Image (cartoon, rainbow, N blue to C red):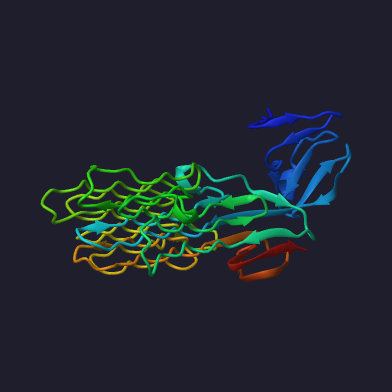
Amino acid sequence: MSELRVNSIEKRTGNNVSMSDALKFKSYTTTQRDALTSVAGDTIYNTTTSKVEYYTGSAWASGLAAVQIQYVIVGGGGAPGAVWGAGTMASGGGGAGGYVSSVIGENTGGGLSSHQVMYIAPSTNYPVSVGAGGTAVSSGNDQGCGFSGTASYFNNIVAMGGGGGNSYINLITTHGRNAKGGSGGGQGTYINVTGANTTGGEGLTGQGYAGGNAQGSFANNQANAAGGGGGAGAVGGNAGSNTGGAGGAGVATSISGSSVTYAGGGGGGGTTSADGGAGGGGDGAENANGTAGTVNTGGGGGGVCSYYSTARYAGNGGSGIVILRYPNTYTISQSGLTLSTATTGTDKVTTITAGTGTVSFA
C-alpha cells in the first residue's frame, strides 16, 4: 500500500496546491520499474535514465528530465572575541558553520536525519555560495563577541554561519555579531566578574549544537576558562578546572567516496588550552593567540586566554564548502565559483570551495 507523508501543504485558489519543499517521487531502476504492476498515471523517478517517468496504460514514457542531487553544505565557522587588560580573561571558541546534508543514510547537523534527495531540472541555473569564516578581532580596543561566519547555500538550501564566540565581557550583539548561529559560540569569562557557569550560544536546530559554558569566577584572581564552540555533531565542552572547553565534534560524510569530517567547533581559551573539535575546529590557547578553523571545513576558530595583562587575539573561522553528487551522465557548468569534479562509481562529485555564482547540469 502506498503511503503519503506530508509536513506542509498549502491550499491555494484556482485548484492549485503549494508545497514548502521539493516533491519526491519513488525511485526505481528500469528493471525494478518493469516488474511493477502499474496503471495509467503512475509516476516514478527512474534512476537508470535519471528521468521522471509515467505509465500511459501500455508503456512507460518520460516527458520531464530531472537530475538527482545529493548535497553537503557547510557554512563558514565563527570566530571568538579578543581579550586583554588586568586579571585573567578568556574567550569562548567559535561555533562551527551549520551542516546540512541529503546524503542517504547519513545525518545532517544537530543529530537529525538527512534531508530528502533533491531533484532539479537540467539546463537551469541554480544559485550557489560558499560562506566565509568569521573574522577574528586583530587590533584595537574591541571587546565584543567574535564575528559570526557567513552562510553557504545551494538553490534554496542554506547552511548558516557559525556563531561568534563570546568575549570575557559577553557582548554578543556588538558590531553586527551574534552568538547564535549554525552552531553556537562558546561562552567567555573574566575572573573579576561575578557569575558562575555562564551559558554558551545556541545552535540552530537541524544544523548544529550549542556552545559550552564558562567556568565561574574565582576570588583568588588566579585562573579562569571559557567554553568550547558547538559543532555540527556535538555540543561544545564546558570549561572546568581552569581548562577551556573542547570544541564540539563535527559530522563525517562519505559523499565524495571516502569519509571526511566537517564543522567542528573551536576550543575555548583557558589557563590550560582546549582542542578544537574534529572537523576543522581551531585549538584554544593559553596566553597566546588562538588557532584558526581549517579552510573549507566550516570549523570554528580557537578561543584565547590572557593572564599577564597582554592582548591576545583569536583565530578566524574556517570557510565553508558545498559538495554535490549526481549521476555521471550529466556535466556541470558554472559561473563565479571555484570547483573541482571527480568520478565516484556511477556518480560525479563536484566540490565547490569558493565564490558566489550558479551551476547547471546538462
Residue 58 relative to residue 231: left or right = right
Residue 276 placement: quadrant:
bottom left
Instruction: Classify residue 330 by image quadrant.
Output: bottom right
User: Is residue 112 placed above or below 340 in the rendered structure?
Assistant: above
Viewed as shown, does residue 177 lie left or right of 275?
right
* Extreme residue in the front direction: 141
Residue beneath the point at 77% across and 44% down: 34
Compared with 146, 294 (above or below) is below
As rendered, which of 64 and 300 lies closer to the eye? 300
Percent position of residue 69, x then y: 66, 54
On the image, the x and y values in percent for residue 121 come to: 77, 54
Residue 165 placement (x, y as % from top left): 38, 55
Percent position of residue 203, x then y: 44, 45
> In the image as oriented, which residue stretches furthest toward the left?
220
- Residue under the image location 27 percent in, 51 percent down: 189
- Describe residue 44's horizontal placement relative to residue 171 as left or right: right
In the picture, the quarter occupied by the N terminus is: top right
Q: Residue at x 47, y 54 (%)?
A: 177
Q: In this picture, is 294 found above or below 9?
A: below
Q: Quarter of the image containing the C terminus?
A: bottom right
* Residue situated in front as seen by the camera: 293 or 262: 293
Residue in front for this viewpoint, 145 or 34: 145
The one nearer the camera, 22 or 134, is: 134
* Mark count: 0
